[in-house]
């Protein structure tokens, strides 16, 4: 899977399946792509295909016409796959920033990546026209960046306002907007676990390099028919589980959370009293076990602190 702010390569490989020592002399194909998110920026050709290199980009239509080349080498692709060409599709242009829309009343959903090959032609060694069979379209999923709630190509104050409105609400709660899309850890409640992900993504924009901070369960838990897979260690209200595994997990989670509660209360004061203890524990477990501060620069840490400060300010108003 990829997200709408990624940069990725599409490669076209070909071969002749018959064991008759006949290779490919030339090949070309039309390649369609998703214009909502990506623009071709580079075409590279396979090392064997150095002759008559072609590729006409029609970005308005989202297609590269006659992408291909020829070769003078013998038996290229005979019984094995050989690279014809690769295309770099990039999301760093302003026109691609809006990308995919996110609905406020449903979890983020994937679309097909939009890469489809068609109109392929090839010639075998000796100038013999080939019968071409295309492979299946790529099964790669294209996902929206779920933290960009206002779909402007960056995670900023506009997105923070939506998140703050959903914060402390259950998913689908009447009168609470954006609870579905703000449940970033997919546990059914917009809480501290979601805050940790939003804070880590805060101030990212579509031109930034590097991956976004997605939960370990993403995108599996978001696919239709998959049960929610958010962090769920503490027992829900009602009779406590008597299984040894559940008891050990709950005990461990309490110890892990309590070790940080004092520091959190010191930083944010009495506002922590407004958040259920279970949510504090979930938030701390999520932050402790899923974050990797050593991989963040100082500016990212500062952005995270700013987002957390603003959200707790919302709590107090």
Image (spheres, rainbow, N blue to C red):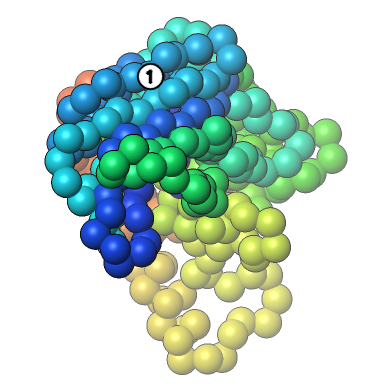
Residue visible at 70% across and 76% down?
A: 238
Residue visible at 46% across and 75% down?
A: 250
Q: Residue 102: x and y, percent?
A: 65, 30
- Position of residue 112 relative to residue 151, above or below, is below
Q: Say left or right for 100 vs 74.
A: right
Q: Say left or right for 137 vs 254.
A: right
As helix, strand or loop, the secondary structure at mark 1 comes to: strand
Q: Residue 187: x and y, percent?
A: 59, 56
- Position of residue 48 relative to residue 204, above or below, is below
- Position of residue 165 relative to residue 188, above or below, is above
- Position of residue 248 relative to residue 215, above or below, is below
How busy is the neighbourhood of tag 1: few (under 14 within 10 Å), some, or many (20 plus)?
A: some
Residue 20, quarter of picture = bottom left
Q: Hey, which residue is sitting farthest right in the picture?
A: 174
Which residue is the site of mark 1?
Answer: 55
Q: Say left or right for 155 vs 167.
A: left
Residue visible at 68% across and 56% down?
A: 224
Nearer-the-camera pick, 215 or 34: 34
Q: Residue 166: x and y, percent?
A: 66, 34
Nearer-the-camera pick, 108 or 65: 65
Disc tally is: 1
Q: Residue 310: x and y, percent?
A: 47, 22
Residue 137 in view here: yes
Nearer-the-camera pick, 312 or 49: 49
Residue visible at 73% across and 41% down?
A: 106
Residue 10 in view here: no
**Which image quadrant: the C terminus?**
top right
């Amino acid at each position: 899977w990829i997200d709408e702010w990624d940069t990725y390569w599409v490669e076209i490989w070909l071969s002749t399946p018959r064991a008759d020592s006949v290779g490919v002399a030339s090949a070309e194909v039309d390649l369609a792509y998703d214009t909502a998110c990506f623009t071709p920026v580079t075409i590279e050709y396979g090392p064997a295909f150095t002759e008559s290199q072609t590729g006409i980009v029609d970005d308005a239509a989202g297609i590269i016409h006659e992408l291909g080349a020829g070769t003078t080498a013998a038996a290229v692709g005979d019984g094995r796959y050989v690279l014809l060409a690769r295309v770099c599709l990039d999301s760093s242009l302003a026109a691609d920033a809006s990308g995919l829309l996110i609905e406020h009343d449903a979890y983020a959903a994937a679309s097909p990546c939009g890469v489809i090959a068609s109109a392929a032609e090839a010639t075998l060694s000796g100038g013999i026209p080939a019968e071409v069979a295309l492979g299946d379209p790529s099964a790669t999923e294209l996902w929206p960046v779920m933290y960009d709630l206002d779909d402007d190509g960056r995670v900023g104050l506009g997105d923070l306002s939506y998140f703050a409105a959903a914060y402390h609400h259950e998913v689908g709660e009447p009168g609470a907007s954006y609870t579905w899309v703000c449940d970033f850890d997919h546990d059914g409640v917009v809480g501290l676990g979601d805050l940790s992900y939003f804070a880590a993504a805060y101030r990212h924009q579509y031109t930034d390099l590097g991956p976004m901070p997605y939960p370990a369960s993403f995108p599996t838990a978001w696919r239709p028919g998959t049960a929610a897979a958010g962090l769920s260690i503490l027992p829900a209200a009602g009779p406590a589980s008597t299984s040894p595994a559940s008891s050990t997990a709950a005990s461990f989670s309490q110890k892990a959370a309590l070790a940080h509660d004092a520091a959190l209360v010191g930083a944010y004061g009495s506002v922590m009293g407004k958040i259920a203890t279970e949510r504090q524990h979930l938030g701390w477990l999520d932050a402790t076990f899923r974050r990797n501060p050593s991989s963040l620069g100082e500016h990212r840490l500062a952005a995270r602190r700013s987002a957390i400060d603003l959200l707790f300010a919302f709590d107090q108003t």
